[in-house]
Image (tube, rainbow, N blue to C red):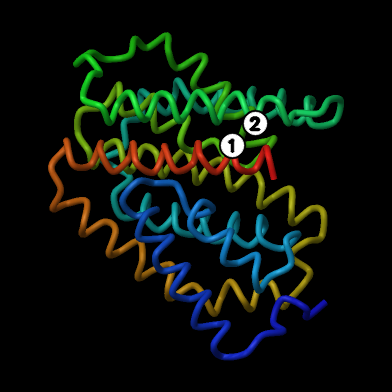
Amino acid sequence: MNEVLVFGLSGYAVIFITLLCAYIIFGIAGFGTALVASPVLALYVPIAKIVPLLALMDMCAAFVNVSRDGRKADWRELRRLVPLMVMGSLIGAAILLKARPDILLLALGVFVVGYSLYSLSGLKPQRRFAPAASVPFGSIGGIFSALFGSGGFIYAIYLSGRIDNKESMRITQTTLIGLSTLTRVVLFALAGVYLDTSLLWLALLLAPGMLLGIALGRRITLKMSREQFLKLINVVVLASGVMLIVRYFS
């Protein structure tokens, strides 16, 4: 049960620095830790442990951010998205049990890459999404969170077209991720995953890097203009889409 901790001090250093970078991105964008951390973690940590580890740390990071800045969240958008996210998660779980969702992974990757490239090109018209857009974005985000643990960038696309204030968008996104990961953490706990004390010790040892990362990310966000913030969000979304396509063909 202690296989997670079978690596030396240099391994811890690499993982710590990777998690620090990942949570700087999380502190800025409210998502994206798996994109940065998973490829490096896979070199040291068994694959089956990575998702529950990051789910636990993402939940804690989100709760820290929400406890600090939760008053800035757009609760109207959360009331729209959260029920749809839950419904989408149930649909995603049903798909996972009854079908091969690989083609959905490819389709989502292509859509996300196309959208982010379009947004980064400067050709995107200055218009807002209608509130009704929460239905496809919220439900699809929930579906892909359940299928692949990757739904944050779907919410980011929607929120960037709805919320003008970058700090409000960041904390609203973080709140969504916190609720999503809470569900996964509860399921992992019920399945007995966290009875592996080595996994909990690793999360505890990496917690300072997570806390430092989200603090630095928050500080960076406060210094960015909205245009810079949205450009960075679109870059992270683009990288997420590319990773989905790579994942499909690998």
Residue 105 numbered tag: 2
| Coordinates of residue 124 in the picture (x, y in percent) | 25, 18
Asked whether, in this view, residue 207 is left or right of residue 124, the answer is right
The C terminus lies in which quarter of the figure? top right
Nearer to us of marks 1 and 2 is 1
Instruction: Look at label 1 and name its amino acid.
Output: Ile
**The one of 61 and 149 positioned closer to us in this rendering:** 149
Outermost bottom residue: 9
| Coordinates of residue 166 in the picture (x, y in percent) | 22, 38
- Looking at the rendering, which quadrant does residue 157 occupy? top left
- Looking at the rendering, which quadrant does residue 144 occupy? top right
Instruction: Look at label 2 and name its amino acid.
Output: Leu
Name the residue located 54 percent from the left edge and 88 percent from the top edge: 10
**In the rendered view, would you say 18 is above or below 70?**
below
Name the residue located 29 percent from the left edge and 49 percent from the top edge: 69
**In the rendered view, would you say 216 is above or below 188?**
below
